[in-house]
Amino acid sequence: MSGVSSWFSRHAQAGIAALGRLLRRPLGTLLATSVIAIALALPAGLWVLTTNLRSLTGDVTQTLEVSVYLKPGVPLERAERLAADARRRAEVASVTVISAEQGLAQFKDHSGFGAALEALDTNPLPHVLTIRPRVTATTPRSMSALRNHLAAWPEADTVQLDTEWVQRLDSILDFLQAAFATLAIALGAGVVAVIGNSVRLEVDSRRAEIEVTKLVGGSNAFVRRPFLYEGFFYGLIGGVLALAYGSAVLAALQEPLARVSALYGGRLGIEGLTLEEAGLLVGAGSLLGLVGAWLGAARHLARIEPRE
């Protein structure tokens, strides 16, 4: 038990000492952690944008429909059998049969040409099947397969499906995901470089102290420990600041977004990071801090040896 207590005590002392050094130079610490925070906030903001667009896409695709206009003369009973065939497909959520009489009545109600339509001897409208796919089957490939199946019916005259906007949005979201991964890697490397350089400068400024520590038997691991904690705190503070910056930006955007939403009669909102995602961001910053501190300290500590 004493060994565990001793280990914990040594690490606590190193951590407290590292945090104290950062607090004793507040301006330099704030500048360094602000740079780290911006580097972490940029990919986090892109992730928030992508997830909100994905959510918006999901809401829109719930209203996506395929309309099958049957050929004139197809009886209503045959339309019902075709609807039953469509319902058996796994990607179909629901099928509604709109008879020619129902279609004509709806057209009279909404077109304003009721009197003119009354003069017609026959109903020019066909029976229509309105098919709503499942949310999980609204990808361009699934919708194209469904459209091809419906268009193969001999009774089908026209299959109306506008998936071009879905394909474009999917392409944009795929690009944003690739951009997020690229940006995260590039800026993560930048965070490691910033923290590594800060720790390297700290090692150089404490060269005499390190030489004395090594002279009395201190190992590289012992000397390196406080610098690792320093890098950890750099990354931790940077991650927390990134969350604060992101929250401030979201708060600033809420009012303009509410005005835009009111103009279109909708309710739009931007969802920020979840608790798990926020923890992952802070954890990633702390981990990058450790990596940067290790790279910055290990190489330079190996070159510092006590003078004979």
Image: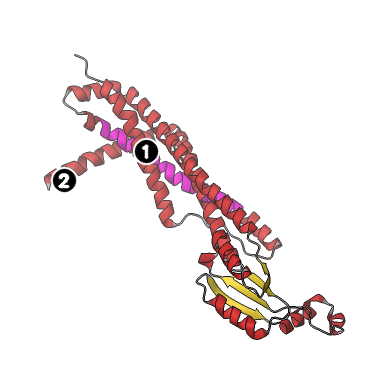
Check disc 1 and report the residue beneath it: 289
Q: Is mark 1 on a helix, strand or loop?
A: helix
Question: What is the span of residues highlighted in magenta in the rendered image?
Answer: 224-253
From the viewer's perspective, tell me whether residue 297 is left or right of residue 106. left
What residue lies at 37% left-to-right and 47% top-to-bottom? 283
Q: Given contact means CB atoms under 8 Å apart, are the residues at marks 1 and 2 in contact?
A: no
Q: Please, is residue 115 above or below residue 211 in the view?
A: below
Residue, far left: 2
Could you tell whether 260 is left or right of 252 in the image?
A: right
Kindly indicate the quadrant of the structure image that contains residue 300.
Answer: top left
- The residue under the point 22% across, 22% down is 212
Mark 1 vs 2, N-terminal side: 2
Placement of 6 over or under 58, stated as above or below: above
Residue carrying label 2: 4
Where is residue 66? Give x, y as percent: 63, 69
Left or right: residue 71 compared with residue 176: right
Query: Can you say which quadrant of the picture contains the C terminus?
Result: top left
Which tag is nearer the camera, tag 1 or tag 2?
1
Kindly tell me whether residue 68 is visible in this rendering: yes
Give the class, few, some or many, for how many residues have Cα within 10 Å of label 1's Cα (few <14, many ≥20). Answer: many
Helix, strand or loop at disc 2? helix
Q: Where is residue 217 in the image (x, y as percent from the top left)?
A: 16, 26
Looking at the image, which is closer to me, 174 or 77?
77
Which of the pair 117/269 is nearer the observer? 117
The quarter holding residue 71 reads: bottom right
From the image, give the main secondary structure of the stretch colored magenta: helix
Picture residue at 37% right of the left edge, 35% below the top: 22
Give the distance between the C-alpha atoms of the residues marked 1 and 2, in whole angstroms. Answer: 25 Å
Which amino acid, mark 2?
A: Val
